Image (cartoon, rainbow, N blue to C red):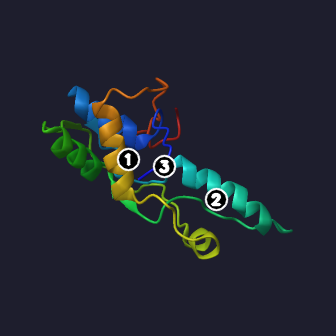
């Protein structure tokens, strides 16, 4: 894959870095949506042609949802180390339905599986980080 990828920020890089460093992954938020930043940017630019009055809501994310535990387990397997968990999953997660976006603008170019593999490689090689956690584990909206 020849995509330029910036993985300095995001829930997947946060989880991958925690697993790689042997730090616990909080399971409070049980699942999340995923999209590569390049696909999100592409959707934002192409959606300008879809502007309307009154405004139309267009949720932008990938079609897949991943469990926080599953993401950590993937990285643990990939890094050949144990995943450490803390907390219990909440009863709900704030997820988006981007089916209208995908109908109008097609599916993202980078799948969840591809993105997870790219993130794993980025963390393995010591790829840069913005040093600003996403707080993906916060469920009460207080960041």
Q: CA distance from mark 2 to mark 1?
A: 26 Å
Instruction: Give the residue displayed 24% in from the left and 34% down from the top.
Output: 19
Residue 131 rendering spot, x and y as whole percentages: 46, 23
Q: Residues within 10 Å of mark 2 (few under 14, many from 20)?
A: many
Residue 43: give its label.
2
Q: Residues within 10 Å of mark 3 (few under 14, many from 20)?
A: few
Q: Earlier in the sequence, mark 3 or mark 1?
A: 3
**Disc 1: which residue:** 29
**Disc 3: which residue:** 3
Q: Secondary structure at mark 2?
A: helix
Given residues 123 and 83, the one toward you in this image is 123
Q: CA distance from mark 3 to mark 2?
A: 16 Å
Q: Nearer the viewer, mark 3 or mark 1?
A: 3
User: Is 88 displayed left or right of 108 in the figure?
Assistant: left
Q: Residues within 10 Å of mark 1 (few under 14, many from 20)?
A: many
Is residue 18 visible to us here? yes
């Amino acid at each position: 894959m020849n995509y330029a990828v910036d993985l300095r920020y995001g829930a997947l890089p946060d989880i991958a870095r925690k697993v790689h460093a042997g730090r616990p992954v909080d399971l409070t938020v049980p699942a999340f949506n995923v999209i590569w930043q390049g696909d999100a940017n592409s959707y934002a630019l192409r959606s300008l042609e879809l502007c309307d009055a009154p405004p139309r809501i267009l949720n932008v994310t990938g079609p897949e949802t991943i469990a926080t535990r599953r993401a950590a387990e993937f990285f643990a397997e990939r890094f050949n180390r144990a995943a450490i968990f803390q907390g219990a999953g909440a009863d709900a997660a704030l997820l988006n339905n981007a089916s209208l976006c995908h109908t109008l603008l097609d599916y993202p170019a980078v799948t969840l599986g591809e993105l997870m593999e790219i993130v794993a490689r980025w963390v393995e090689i010591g790829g840069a980080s913005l040093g600003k956690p996403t707080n993906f584990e916060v469920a009460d909206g207080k960041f």
